[in-house]
Amino acid sequence: MDSPGVLLVFFLLPLLLCFPGGAPDLEADRAALLAFQAAVGRGELLWNASATPCSWVGVRCNGGRVTRIRLPATRLVGQIPAGTLGNLTALQVVSLRLNALSGPLPPDLASCKELRIVYLQGNRFSGEIPAGLFSLDKLVLLNLAINNFTGGISPGFNNLTRLETLHLEHNQLSGEIPDLHLPTLVQFNVSFNPLNGSIPAGLRRMSSDAFLGTGLCGLPLRACSPMHEKSKLSGDAIAGIAIGAVVGFLIVAALLVILCRRGRGSKRTANVEAPRESERALRGSGAVQNENGLAAEKVGLSRYGQSLVFLKPGPKVYDLEDLLGASAAVLGRGTTGTTYKAMLETGMVVAVKRLKDVNLPEEEFREKVEAIGAMDHPNLVPLHAFYRSKDEKLLVYDYIPMGSLSSVLHGNRGAGWTPLDWETRSGIALAAARGIEYIHSIGSEVSHGNIKSSNILLGNSFEAHVSDYSLANLVSPSDTPSHAACYRAPEVTDAQKVSQKADVYSFGVLLLELLTGKPPMQGFHDEGGPDLPRWVQSVVQEEWISEVFDLGLLRYQNVEEEMVQLLQVGIDCAAQYPDKRPSMSQVVIQIEEVHRSSLASMGRNHQQDHHAIGDADDQSSKLTDSIEES
Ligand SMILES: *[C@@H]1O[C@H](CO)[C@@H](O)[C@H](O)[C@H]1NC(C)=O
Ligand SMILES: *[C@@H]1O[C@H](CO)[C@@H](O)[C@H](O)[C@H]1NC(C)=O
Ligand SMILES: *[C@@H]1O[C@H](CO)[C@@H](O)[C@H](O)[C@H]1NC(C)=O
Ligand SMILES: *[C@@H]1O[C@H](CO)[C@@H](O)[C@H](O)[C@H]1NC(C)=O
Ligand SMILES: *[C@@H]1O[C@H](CO)[C@@H](O)[C@H](O)[C@H]1NC(C)=O
Ligand SMILES: *[C@@H]1O[C@H](CO)[C@@H](O)[C@H](O)[C@H]1NC(C)=O
């Protein structure tokens, strides 16, 4: 009679043994996260227990499981118990950096077999690096810097065959570094640990400042003291070594002489190829020799006797005659016309754009230009005045001194050239996004229409101003192929009709250009190869850090995560289908988040006492305020 029950138990038992707590699913993940919140959240982690965990701050899901946790600088305090993080077996990315987490890492972290990216720097973790970590063979990035880990560096790291980034600096790790063979390792740092012994062969290719503040010796640092071995050697051997050393010295000296000569030779050619970048950046893409470009038109213009129409309130400090009498230099030639830098006799400098191919009737032209003149936002280049005659259409803008983002990013990288730093780049991204968001806020049909890096102009402290907005529907489309095509969304067929979603696409390409340092020109990879967005997507996400980012950004290890986040925003914007792209206001919110979080990381990094979490928070809020103000 009771055989069906027995049978049921018989079949269920193995299942129950496999999954003692039931199969891992979103409900199990929720329970684990709530236990994590109760243990270290200190009541400040506001997760709504009745909503899905996938909607919680810092939590991301994929395929019905929790795959990412990002809670940087969120005042987490205390020890992470077993049965919390360790139960999130689908976890791929975890970032708990800049908190006050302490005690040993939970040993069951080893159950998170999918972990690829782990940021735990800037906490108070202690104890040994748990051996379980070395079974996580998908790890690409492990950052345990600025903690209180003790014990040795295990040879178990050799199991992490995909590891590209390993940060262990500022801990209490001691003893010798075992022979590590990690061919994929690109970034490595064990500075400020009481390590000793010689640097193993597999790590000699790292730079010497990966080993600062340690007792290590050997390449790339000073040679290990040979005293010990030498005393054991016989007189003959010493004589042999001495002769060998003399011969060796002569060979090295000869090589040095040859190398120096070659080095000098190649430097000379490098100088010839690379004109001074500072000059180029300051003057934009300008052909400076074209002085009096505007004055040359003077005769043709003044015949009409019309005057400038001013679009902004305030004193009119110049008139058409002043403008035409100004000496001018070409700043750039684009699809909408040529822009000059005009230096008035009063010393004032303005930018003047000569539109080409305007076929609009006067009334319509006036209306459209007045609408552009009415736009007013700190991240737009203001349009002050215009002039219209039958043959000539001029727009007068503020002159922005540092030239375009395009020339700063891709200008010749000669001597004295420094790449834009991360703070500048993320600041430019945010400012440009805000300018474009403003344009979109005017009305659903209003768009920029021509977003590209040569239309982002930089002020003296690299603050970004968007230029050339809403000009696309003033001028007739030209047939000449241009760089603009690489920024154009796939659905755009008429360059005069660019939707807001198409602007978002162009902005996405611009973001990718800013982060990769690569111009999005056609045939960018090879002739006929993928465009910039497709290329970035073709590189697997884990390799972004080493493969995709501009070399000038690789030294910002403490903001890698933000860099990856911003890259993701760029990719989302450059989605193939318009309805998959975010709106510009969503983009602004996302970039603000990245910017705030990276300022918190940088602020944190600047201060010496890395255990004063309260101070770090004070610092980040001050910096955040200053962004809000700017
Ligand atoms: C974690 O998983 C174990 C084993 O499946 C289970 O016993 C425990 O209750 C889980 N922890 C939480 C907080 O759900
Ligand atoms: C929590 O989530 C539930 C379900 O989504 C919702 O009804 C409720 O308003 C939320 N509570 C708070 C405080 O946000
Ligand atoms: C770091 O660990 C050492 C030894 O375990 C301990 O004495 C010290 O107090 C710890 N420091 C901090 C800031 O936790
Ligand atoms: C490293 O991998 C080997 C083989 O996969 C395994 O036997 C060993 O236990 C691993 N070592 C550690 C420390 O996990
Ligand atoms: C490194 O330091 C440890 C402990 O301080 C010591 O026992 C060991 O001999 C040292 N090794 C070398 C190569 O100096
Ligand atoms: C390693 O970390 C130290 C301390 O933060 C830093 O000064 C050094 O520049 C870093 N070196 C490398 C190669 O990352």
Image (cartoon, grey):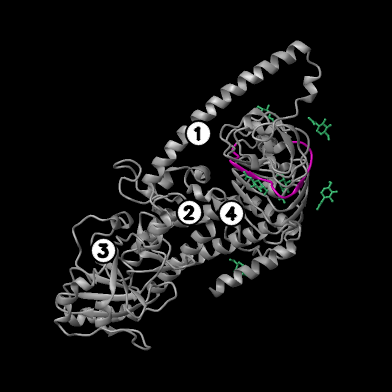
**How far apart are the alpha carbons under marks 2 and 1?**
41 Å
**How far apart are the alpha carbons under marks 3 and 2?**
39 Å
Q: Nearer the viewer, mark 4 or mark 3?
A: 3
**How far apart are the alpha carbons under marks 4 and 3?**
43 Å
Q: Amino acid at mark 4?
A: Val
Q: Is residue 413 above or below residue 615?
A: above
First in sequence: mark 1 or mark 4? 1
Which span is picked out in magenta? 138-153
Q: Is residue 102 above or below residue 467?
A: above
* SS under mark 2: helix
Any mark on residue 567, and which? Answer: 2
Residue 589 position, x and y percent, is 51, 66
Any mark on residue 290, and which? Answer: 3
Residue pictured at 18% horizontal, 58% vertical: 479
First in sequence: mark 3 or mark 1? 1
Q: Is residue 143 magenta?
A: yes
Q: Nearer the viewer, mark 3 or mark 2?
A: 3
Residue 626 position, x and y percent, is 59, 72
Q: Amino acid at mark 3?
A: Asn
Provide the residue designation for mark 4. Answer: 559
Is disc 2's CB within 8 Å of ligand 6?
Answer: no
Crowding at dot 4, Cα within 10 Å, few <14 / some 14-19 / many 20+, comes out as: many
Tell whether label 1 touches label 2 (CB within 8 Å).
no
Q: Nearer the viewer, residue 570 or 414?
A: 414
Q: Nearer the viewer, mark 4 or mark 2?
A: 4
